[in-house]
Image: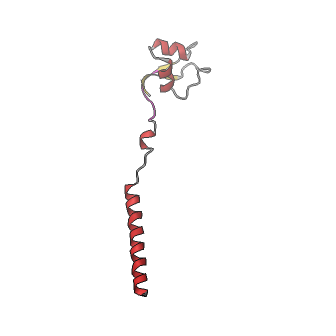
Amino acid sequence: MASYKTSVFCNLALFVALLLIVSVAESRNFAVGLVKSPPTCDSVYGAQEGDTCFDVSQKFNLTNELFLAINPNIDCDAVFVGQWLCVAGSA
């Protein structure tokens, strides 16, 4: 009787181990496709006195949304002379 219980226990342990191995092997990181890639910049412009985000986006025929997307850290209330602004790229 003891050998039967030992056999059942060993089979159960092997089955649980097999399930664990299969679940780890089949697990996938579903968030990989959800990570947004950083914007790329192909051309820059040095801001001049009086430039605003709107002026620069109009000068280079960019929509406001694209301009802000390719310049993610820009503070449009504080554009300074010589600041590099991305004027061509993808977001």
Magenta stretch, residue numbers: 37-44
Q: Total of numbered circles in the picture? A: 0
Q: Is residue 42 magenta?
A: yes
- Nearer-the-camera pick, 31 or 65: 31
Query: Looking at the picture, how far across and down is residue 46, in whole percent?
Result: 50, 19
Q: Indicate how the structure is coloured in the image.
A: secondary structure
- Nearer-the-camera pick, 48 or 31: 31
Query: Looking at the picture, how far across and down is residue 39, in whole percent?
Result: 45, 30
- Nearer-the-camera pick, 47 or 28: 28
Residue that lies at the very extreme toward the right in this rendered image: 77
Q: Which residue sits at x=43%, y=46%?
A: 30
- Nearer-the-camera pick, 12 or 48: 12
Residue that lies at the very extreme toward the front in this rendered image: 1
The reply, left or right, for residue 49 in relation to residue 28 is right
Q: Which residue sits at x=49%, y=26%?
A: 69
- Quarter of the view holding residue 89: top left
Q: Is residue 41 magenta?
A: yes
Q: Main secondary structure of the magenta part?
A: strand
Query: Looking at the picture, how far across and down is residue 13, in whole percent?
Result: 42, 73
Q: Which residue sits at x=44%, y=35%?
A: 37
Q: Which residue sits at x=40%, y=51%?
A: 28
